[in-house]
Amino acid sequence: MKKIMVTGALGQIGSELIAKLQKEYGENNVLSTDIRQPQSSVSGPFEILDVTDGKKMHEIAKDFGADTIMHMAALLSATAEKQPLFAWNLNMGGLVNALEVARELNMQFFTPSSIGAFGPSTPKANTPQDTLQRPTTMYGVNKVAGELLCDYYYTRFGVDTRGVRFPGLISYVAQPGGGTTDYAVDIYYKAIEEGQYTSFIAEGTYMDMMYMPDALQAIVDLMEADPAKLVHRNAFNVTAMSFEPSEIAASIQKHIPDFTISYEVDPVRQAIADSWPDSIDPSAAVAEWGFKTKYDLDAMTADMLEQLRKKLNK
Ligand code: AKB
């Protein structure tokens, strides 16, 4: 039975990952940690943790008897671009602390990388697993350094590090904060609340995306995968779909025919999006640990709108 400590548990992924892990491994075997106090009650154990405090992270993990750490606390791409030095300190400082705790306490380790680990010189279509990675954002620099650091802790210290490169993740539970792909979440809220959406990403800009249930299943499947079959271990390309703003709008129009989209492009987030791939190739994840997804764009749209209508009482 796993005993899992999760950092950044109140974030977009963390909020839903906790419930998924509790279902798989039992409520008392999952420890949520976050720098923020939860707004409402969290099920299962919870501790306040600033991930830049490595000593406290070690103490909490040891007291809980954790054998696995899932390190989710990080700043996303657009926020990191506004505060690059803070992003470096938080993203890299938190990661190296979590890796050290995993090494000291002999824990299995997971952290997400991102499509942000690619840059303008990376092949844009069907981006291979192993390819050029020269990102031009602080977030991307953090993600590439993080991928290498996780590989280093595996080869140098034998820490069982595993990870994926997530695309934009779409969910109705917690809103993402400060990402470039966030438009693909905002659009569903605005479609229900206002019947229209002004996109900060330009028409024609393709990015990879995935619905949260598929992302959570990918984490569990990778962590349960036979280590003998893992050639890459860290930073597997994973994706479920690639679309541009007018395509997600068309998918919403199948349910809300009067929905309209317009564009007011944010130059910072557009430049980040333009530096990322249009679509990535997940075949290494499929071959090495059986990565699969259930939701394409239309299936995701139908579920998002149904769930958000309930959430927003609309
Ligand atoms: C972001 O937009 O920053 C994230 C990501 C793709 O890593 N959603």
Image (cartoon, grey):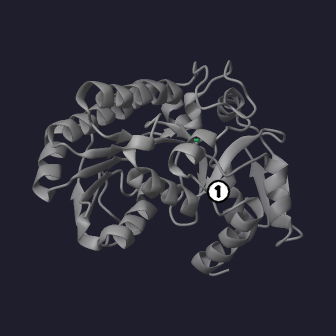
| Residue name at image x 40 percent, y 68 percent | 19
Establish if 111 lies above or below 119.
Answer: below
Q: Specify whether residue 72 is in view.
A: no
Does any atom of ligand 1 lie closer than 8 Å to the CB of label 1? no
Establish if 68 lies above or below 42.
Answer: above
Q: Residue 101 occupies which quadrant of the picture?
A: top left
Establish if 65 lies above or below 172.
Answer: above
Q: Position of residue 295 (x, y in %)?
A: 67, 62
Label 1: state its secondary structure: helix
Between 218 and 11, the one nearer to me in the picture: 218
| Residue name at image x 63 percent, y 41 percent | 283
Q: Residue furthest right?
A: 257
Residue 237 is left or right of residue 71, and the answer is right
| Residue name at image x 62 percent, y 75 percent | 307
Quadrant assignment for ligand 1: top right
Amino acid carrying mark 1 in the image = Val
Q: Specify whether residue 240 is in view.
A: yes
Q: Quadrant of the C terminus?
A: bottom right
The number of numbered badges drawn on the structure is: 1
Residue 47 is left or right of residue 297, and the answer is left
Residue 271 is left or right of residue 247, and the answer is left
| Residue name at image x 36 percent, y 51 percent | 8
Q: Residue 211 occupies which quadrant of the picture?
A: bottom right
Residue underneath mark 1: 185
Between 182 and 27, the one nearer to me in the picture: 27
Q: Position of residue 280 (x, y in %)?
A: 67, 37
Q: Position of residue 5 (x, y in %)?
A: 26, 54
